[in-house]
Image (spheres, helix red, strand yellow):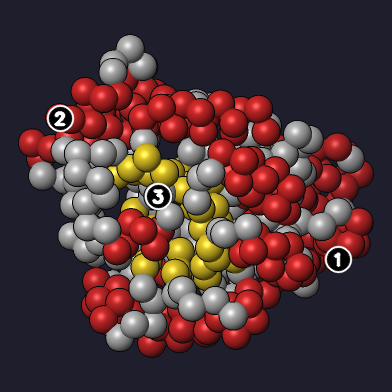
């Protein structure tokens, strides 16, 4: 949805009652997803999406709890309709960031809300950094240091005004370029990871499992699936899931697609689920039906300057507006 339409729908939805929108849509289960929560700004994230403060996150939770029964992913998968007539929510968190351990899991535990945390295998223990987080760090650096900006601009043969947009546009295929730009900007990614752990370490992952939460796989290093062929997609899901099972002794096989599940063919989804490579697959397309209980599309909550409740209202209204067009079923 483009920004203009999004804003119009959001303001139209604001005075509406969520209960009513849910009733009209017939969609009683929601899957909001987040990445992290932090009281301070996080340079590796803040130029990509909004970082919620713990109090903002808690307010989201309290509002959601008034309307939805929290379910674990496993309960949702097993129990075909939840308690009859009840609205339910399944919370998930992508990328395995430190804030999950420091703020999110403790708060969820206190409130008795189950959740699943999706991890990139190669980033656990801060052994690597997602290239988009590197881009965010680089943007942070050029914003705060004009010498760095100048050097990056010279390196890329562009004007200084174009630096930020160009860094933002660096995709999976060009991710090595970020290393070269970091040298120009005198930015040390490994040093940053050492001084300020971005991800949870293995002990912390074990702790959240002990607290009763689930973990799931999110690919080895946040791979862009649109760059893979069908067999590589299969292999990536399988390796990522099996690695977590081996390392942490979990028996679940949940996988959330990095970025999006757009571009993953229906046959790949079917074979992953039918062959048991994964027992649940999750995307980020918003409120959408997929025709399969174990293939779930989630609602991103950090993308806009809105509370979870406001985001949900906009999602539901958008869903209702598309109903006559029959466009709420995911086309794969
Ligand atoms: Zn992710």
Q: Is residue 250 above or below residue 50?
A: below
Residue at horizontal 59 percent and vertical 31 percent from the top: 58
Q: Quadrant of residue 220?
A: bottom right
Q: Which mark is residue 62?
A: none
Q: Is residue 22 above or below residue 80?
A: above
Circle 1 — which element? helix
Which residue is tagged 3? Answer: 71
The answer to whether any part of residue 163 appears in the image is no
Count neighbours of disc 1 (C-alpha within 10 A) and say few if under 14, some if 14 to 19, many if 20 or more: some
Residues at circles 3 and 2 in contact by the CB criterion of under 8 Å: no
Residue at horizontal 46 percent and vertical 48 percent from the top: 91
Q: Nearer the viewer, residue 235 or 16?
A: 16
Return the disc, 2 or 1, that comes first in the chain's sequence.
Answer: 2
Q: Image quadrant for the N terminus?
A: top left
Q: Which mark is residue 24?
A: 2
Which residue is tagged 1? Answer: 190
Using residue 274 as the reference point, say whether residue 124 is left or right of it: right
Count neighbours of disc 2 (C-alpha within 10 A) and say few if under 14, some if 14 to 19, many if 20 or more: few
Comparing marks 3 and 2, which lies closer to the viewer? 3
Q: Nearer the viewer, residue 228 or 242?
A: 242
Q: Nearer the viewer, residue 232 or 257?
A: 257
- Residue 149 position, x and y percent, is 83, 45
């Amino acid at each position: 949805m483009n920004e203009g339409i999004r804003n119009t729908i959001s303001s139209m939805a604001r005075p509406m009652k969520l209960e009513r929108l849910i009733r009209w849509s017939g969609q009683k289960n929601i899957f909001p997803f987040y990445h992290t929560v932090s009281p301070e700004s996080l340079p590796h994230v803040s130029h990509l999406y909004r970082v919620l403060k713990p109090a903002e996150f808690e307010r989201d939770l309290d509002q959601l709890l008034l309307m939805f029964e929290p379910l674990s992913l496993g309960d949702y998968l097993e129990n075909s309709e939840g308690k009859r007539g009840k609205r339910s929510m399944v919370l998930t968190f992508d990328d395995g960031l430190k804030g999950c351990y420091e703020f999110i899991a403790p708060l969820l535990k206190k409130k008795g809300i189950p959740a699943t945390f999706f991890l990139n295998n190669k980033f656990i223990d801060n052994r690597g950094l997602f290239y988009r987080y590197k881009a965010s760090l680089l943007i942070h650096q050029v914003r705060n240091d004009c010498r760095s900006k100048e050097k990056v601009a010279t390196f890329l043969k562009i004007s200084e005004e174009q630096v930020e947009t160009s860094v933002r546009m660096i995709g999976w295929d060009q991710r090595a370029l970020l290393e070269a730009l970091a040298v120009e900007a005198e930015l040390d990614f490994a040093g940053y990871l050492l001084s300020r752990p971005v991800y949870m370490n293995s002990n912390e992952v074990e702790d959240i499992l002990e607290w009763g939460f689930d973990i799931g796989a999110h690919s080895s290093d946040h791979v862009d699936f649109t760059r893979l062929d069908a067999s590589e997609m299969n292999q990536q899901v399988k390796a990522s899931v099996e690695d977590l099972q081996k390392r942490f002794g979990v028996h679940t096989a949940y996988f959330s697609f990095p970025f999006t599940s757009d571009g993953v063919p229906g046959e790949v989804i079917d074979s992953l689920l039918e062959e048991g490579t994964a027992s649940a697959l999750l995307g980020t397309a918003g409120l959408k039906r997929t025709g399969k209980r174990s293939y779930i599309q989630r609602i991103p909550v950090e993308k806009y300057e809105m509370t979870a409740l406001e985001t949900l209202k906009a999602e539901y209204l958008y869903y209702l507006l598309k109903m006559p067009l029959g466009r709420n079923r995911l086309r794969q």
